[in-house]
Amino acid sequence: MELSKKERYKLILLTCFILAIIGVAVLYFINWSLIIQAFQAYEGAFEVLLVISIRILILSITVFYLFHKWFKQEAQYLSDIPFLLGLFFLILIFGKVIDLLWDLTYFTFNDDVVLMFLKFRFFIIILEVAPLIFLGLEIIFFKLEDRFQKLKNKEYMNKMRVIIILIIVSVESFIVIIAPNTTILGRILPAIVIPSLIGIVYIFFLAYRLKRLKVVKPGILTIGFFLYLLSNILRPIIQYILGEVAMYIILAELVDIFVFLIIFLGLYKR
């Protein structure tokens, strides 16, 4: 019996989700002794676990809401807003799970392992922002379609969006791969994340002005992602002031929990 389009999408998402969980479980299993050691040796390790777990819970609720909303539609398209935003939050969940492992085991790794770990995390960040950029391109193309008539063709527009996303992801991934050390890699992160978030804030603001993306509240999302942008800018400053200690991680995560509650409010629409 042939599966429907909706059932195929559910199967693909479930398979990817299970494979990602298995991959994360293997990472935690390999480093289990280091994790136990962290709870015994580092003050604030339990608080770090608690605050990141709360953030993962909020992200998980958001993902469930968005995908539930997507599958309730009569038809499902990969360019739909609930799917793209759900994909962003889903990838972000696994990013935070990796961050937790990193926070607990950071001081036990040598420089080569740290570099490899950071590159892996940066690849996840690149994948995180890709769905948001893809979503944003629709707003930009909508604004340009009077000048470029081809953009009024949805199939052509989606093809151009895919090509642009592939170019962006390929260039960013190549830069991360060739980075020779953690110092240069640390400078690359703001160059990837901050321009992407600035673009996302502008896109939601533009959607608010143009009255687009009516299945969400673009005005609230503009505020939410602007605060998320500020959070990412302020993180290195807070880290410099407090140092690589548990208090820095807890404070940064608490700020992001507040920010993502605002973002969820922007996504929730009856």
Image (cartoon, rainbow, N blue to C red):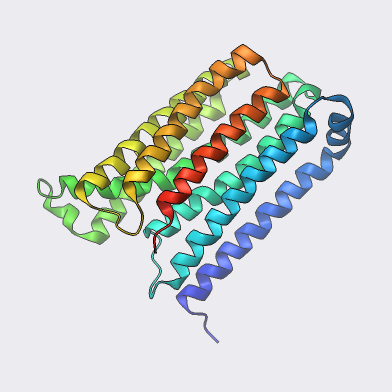
Q: In the image, what residue occupies the spot 46% across and 44% down? A: 262
Q: In x, y percent, where is residue 107?
A: 78, 22
* 268 on left or right of 156: right
Quadrant containing the N terminus in the rendered view: bottom right
Nearest to the observer: residue 9 or residue 220: 220
Q: Quadrant of residue 28?
A: top right
- Picture layout, residue 248 above or below residue 2: above
Picture coordinates of residue 21 (x, y %)? 70, 53
Which residue does the image show at 56% across and 62% down from the upper left? 13
Instruction: Kindly tell me whether residue 258 is visible in this rendering.
Output: yes
* Tag count: 0
Q: Residue furthest bottom?
A: 1
Residue 11 percent coordinates (x, y): 58, 69
**Residue 127 shows in the view:** no
Q: Quadrant of the C terminus?
A: bottom left
Along the viewing direction, whichever of 190 and 268 lies nearer the viewer: 268
Instruction: Residue at 46%, 75% (x, y): give it.
Output: 5
Q: Residue furthest top?
A: 241
Q: Residue at x 59, y 15 (%)?
A: 183
**Residue 73 % position (x, y):** 40, 72
Residue 112 drawn above or below residue 164: above
Q: Quadrant of residue 221?
A: top left
Which corner quadrant of the image does residue 64 belong to?
A: bottom right
